[in-house]
Image (spheres, rainbow, N blue to C red):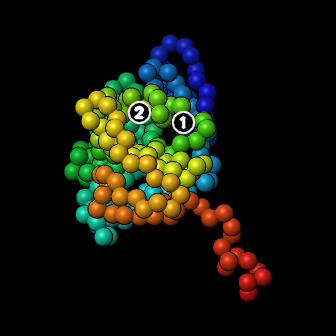
Amino acid sequence: MSVTKHKPATYADLEAVPPNLVAEILFGTLVTHPRPILDHAEATNALGALATGSYQFGNGGPGGWTFPIEPELHLGSHVVVPDIAGWRRERLQPQRHAAFTTIAPDWICETLSPSTEKYDRGQKRAIYAQFGVGHLWFLDPRVKSLECFVLQGNEWVLKGTFFDSDKVCAAPFDQMTFSLELLWPPDEPAAANDQSAI
């Protein structure tokens, strides 16, 4: 991840970043990083699909949520782009037709990578606490782990850590249980793609 150090970054600085990079403004500094690798993107998408099925569409869950992928959040002077964010639908209604929102999510998941982990665990976590995001999850495909935090006062409290194929049941989505291994891309090609299996 590269950091540009000058006067406080503006939105014009962010708009000038090439489209192959993700750009954010954290505490006045323009921060950029490359788009995620496929394992990262696949794990993020799988988690989003599980949450969406139960908590947006109501398949075996309560519904009532919405889950934009990589939404642009304007939180005070900060511009952040989490991997996934979730809102109770009624809270997001006033800004549904804008390119960004100033409404802090109820839940955020950051999928960790070497280029983003320092910021996800550091400055971005502090920003999310400051603006009252209730739940923060860290998904790490490199070690096949999921950490689930709840905001209590101004502090993040770790409520659960899961690995490999552990069964996950964690707030705010504790009306569903899923195997963590559903999020990890298979190490081997599917048998259907193996010509020797025909």
**The one of 170 and 45 positioned closer to us in this rendering:** 170
| Residue 164 falls left or right of residue 55 | right
Residue 42 to residue 30: above or below: below
**The one of 158 and 32 positioned closer to us in this rendering:** 158
Query: Which badge, 2 or 1, is on the more N-terminal residue?
Result: 1
- Which SS class for mark 1? helix
Residue 183 to residue 16: above or below: below
Residue found 38% across the figure and 37% down from its top: 73
**The one of 70 and 153 positioned closer to us in this rendering:** 153
| Residue 75 falls left or right of residue 35 | left
Q: Amino acid at mark 1?
A: Glu
User: Circle 1 is placed at which residue position?
Assistant: 117
Residue 104 to residue 177: above or below: above
Residue found 45% across the figure and 39% down from its top: 81
Residue 1 to residue 180: above or below: above
Q: Amino acid at mark 2?
A: Arg
The numbered disc on residue 5 is none
Separation of marks 2 and 1 at Cα, in angstroms? 10 Å
Label 2 CA crowd tier, 10 Å (few <14, some 14–19, many 20+): some
The C terminus: image quadrant = bottom right
Q: Which residue lies most toward the bottom here?
A: 198
User: Circle 2 is placed at which residue position?
Assistant: 125
| Residue 170 falls left or right of residue 70 | left
Q: How many marks?
A: 2
- Which SS class for mark 2? helix
Q: Residue 61's image quarter?
A: bottom left
**The one of 174 and 2 positioned closer to us in this rendering:** 174
Residue found 37% across the figure and 24% down from its top: 77
Taking the image as drawn, is residue 96 in sight? no
